[in-house]
Image: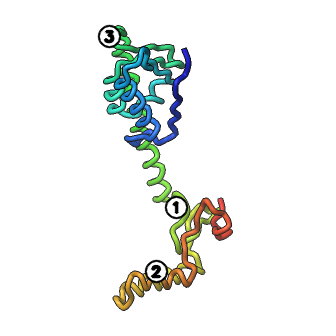
Amino acid sequence: MFIVREFIDIESAKQIGRTSFTALLDFFKKQERVKKNEPCRILLVEKTDRLYRNIRDWVTMDEFDLEIHFVKEGVVLSRDSHSSEKFMHGIKVLMAKNYVDNLSEEVKKGLNQKASEGHWPSVAPVGYLNDRQSHLIKIDPDRAPLIRQIFEKYASSEFSLQAICNWAEAESLRHPDPANRSTRPESIEY
């Protein structure tokens, strides 16, 4: 026995349509179409919540006639597994779904709490700065007046959107890119 292919999934648990999971599904669909002597029908997975991130993933994977080994759980599931093993596996899938849902709720709650305290959850919008000491946002004395001018130009109806964009470009008004430290003003470093 040997490993035919490896799939690594680092995408969000909440999102449906993960790239690696989709590639995994395509691989097994192709295995079903290919009528070789021994198509790959065994899947090794770390644990339940690494394979299934939602109920749809479980239903989709169940359509394949696979033998799935959940290594950390010491469980092997197949069509021939006992009903009690399948039942317990279903509970683990629902627990993984609950974990994802709860994590999403807690992140939203944390971001809302942060916002209610006047904190900005990431890099402050153009015209504001993140204050490292207070962890609040403050008005950017250099860029805020330019932002005001953009709104005034737009409200006047005398300028096209393209003219406003050209003006902002001429004023070097760009949102600092957090990935490029060289374009970030010193006051927003974390």
Q: Quadrant of residue 32?
A: top left
Q: Residue furthest front?
A: 36
> Alpha carbon of mark 1 to alpha carbon of mark 2: how far?
26 Å
- At a point 52% along the width and 28% down the height, the residue shown is 5
Dividing the image into 4 quarters, which one contains the C terminus?
bottom right
Q: Which amino acid type is shown beneath numbered disc 1?
A: Trp
> Alpha carbon of mark 3 to alpha carbon of mark 2: how far?
63 Å
Mark 1 vs mark 3: in front: 3
Mark 3 vs mark 2: in front: 2
Q: Quadrant of residue 151?
A: bottom left
First in residue order: circle 3 vs circle 2: 3
- At a point 38% along the width and 29% down the height, the residue shown is 30
Residue 16 or residue 153, whichever sits in front = 16
- Please tell me whether mark 3 sits on a helix, a strand or a loop: helix
- Please tell me whether mark 1 sits on a helix, a strand or a loop: loop
Res 129 label = none
Res 120 label = 1
Above-or-below relation of 91 to 190:
above
- The residue that mark 2 highlights is 165
- Please tell me whether mark 2 sits on a helix, a strand or a loop: helix
Residue 188: x and y in percent read 63, 66
Above-or-below relation of 49 to 156:
above
Residue 28: x and y in percent read 40, 27
Q: Which amino acid type is shown beneath numbered disc 2?
A: Cys
Q: Quadrant of residue 102?
A: top left
Q: Which amino acid type is shown beneath numbered disc 3?
A: Ser
First in residue order: circle 1 vs circle 3: 3
